[in-house]
Image (cartoon, helix red, strand yellow):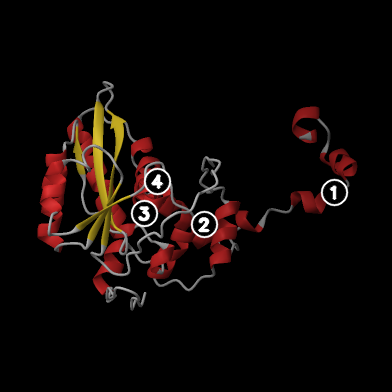
Amino acid sequence: MLIAKMGMSQRAACRVTGMTRSTFRRKPLADTPDDPDRWLRDWLHKWVGLERNARKGYRRAWADLKAEGHLINKKRVHRVWREEGLQVKHRRRRKKPLKRSKTVVKADAANVVWAADFQFDATSDHRRIKIFSMVDEHTRESLTDLVERSITAEGVVAALDAVITLRGLPLMLRLDNGPEFIADVLAEYCEKKLKILFVPPGEPWRNGFIESFNNRVRDECLNQHQFDTILQARVLIGDWKRGYNEFHRHSSLGYATPDEYAARCDCVHETVNSVCRR
């Protein structure tokens, strides 16, 4: 700054700052051909350049490195990640104190609990689009990609029936108290087939798996695209959800993707305890 803005000579600027000229002239190792992390810097920039990874952090980059066969320390990846300025900025929301009431039912195997919810966005002409999402709480798989201008209880039943045809019946559904979920149509469809567990009003954290998934849909897909038509929204959101199942690595699954974990999952549901080897 002294040299560029105040016109000082290099010698005078170094004298003022107390720095030796040899130190000033020395290039950082990262800027030289001898940089041992050059391959890692290039790999990380290439990885971040993929659209599906634009909002992901260094831990999932490290997991993908391991999946490719690189034996590398997570701390090293974190150091290079920070040096390259690749941190993802998140808006932190102040958390409210939680009130505890009933015990949350845990999914100890696949097809035990499916959680579902809606979220909304809009096309460029300001017309609303409605997105129906559903996840398996154990495998973290995204199960449906229904996107319409309007989704009724009948639409929910049709989407649910299509997933059940492919995967079989779950033991229960975890839902909020939205009008589509409390409708008689859904209750009649689920009667004698599966249970419906409604989360208490005003306690969305009791449906935390789908809330977390919807936050990721918002951050990595909806906020990254402008939808001009409903067809474009269906394609982009559907592609993102399929990519989520194939490529998103969960720390809770041992940094496996939902598809990888589901393929090898041998957890057995038990009423009291469960046998689960991740």
Q: Residue at x 29, y 73 (%)?
A: 271
Number of the label disc, if any, that sits on residue 19 = 1
Circle 3 is placed at which residue position? Answer: 209
In the displayed orientation, state which residue is furthest to the front: 101
Question: Pointers 2 and 4 in contact (CB under 8 A)?
Answer: no
Q: Quadrant of the C terminus?
A: bottom left
Query: Observer-nearest residue: 227 or 48?
Result: 227
The kind of residue tagged 3 is: Phe
Three-letter amino acid code at disc 4? Pro
Separation of disc 2 and disc 1 at Cα? 29 Å
Q: Position of residue 258 (x, y in %)?
A: 30, 62
Q: Nearer the viewer, residue 111 or 248?
A: 111
Q: Earlier in the sequence, mark 2 or mark 1?
A: 1
Q: Position of residue 183 (x, y in %)?
A: 18, 40
Mark 4 packing: few (<14 Cα in 10 Å), some, or many (20+)? few
* Tags 4 and 3 touching, CB below 8 Å: no
Quadrant in the rendering for residue 252 = bottom left
Query: Do labels 2 and 3 touch, CB within 8 Å?
Result: no
Q: Which residue is mark 4?
A: 204
Question: Relative to residue 265, is residue 126 depicted above or below?
Answer: above
Quadrant holding the N terminus: top right
Of pointers 4 and 1, the one earlier in the residue sequence: 1
Could you give the CA–CA distance between mark 2 and mark 4, rounded to whole angstroms? Answer: 40 Å
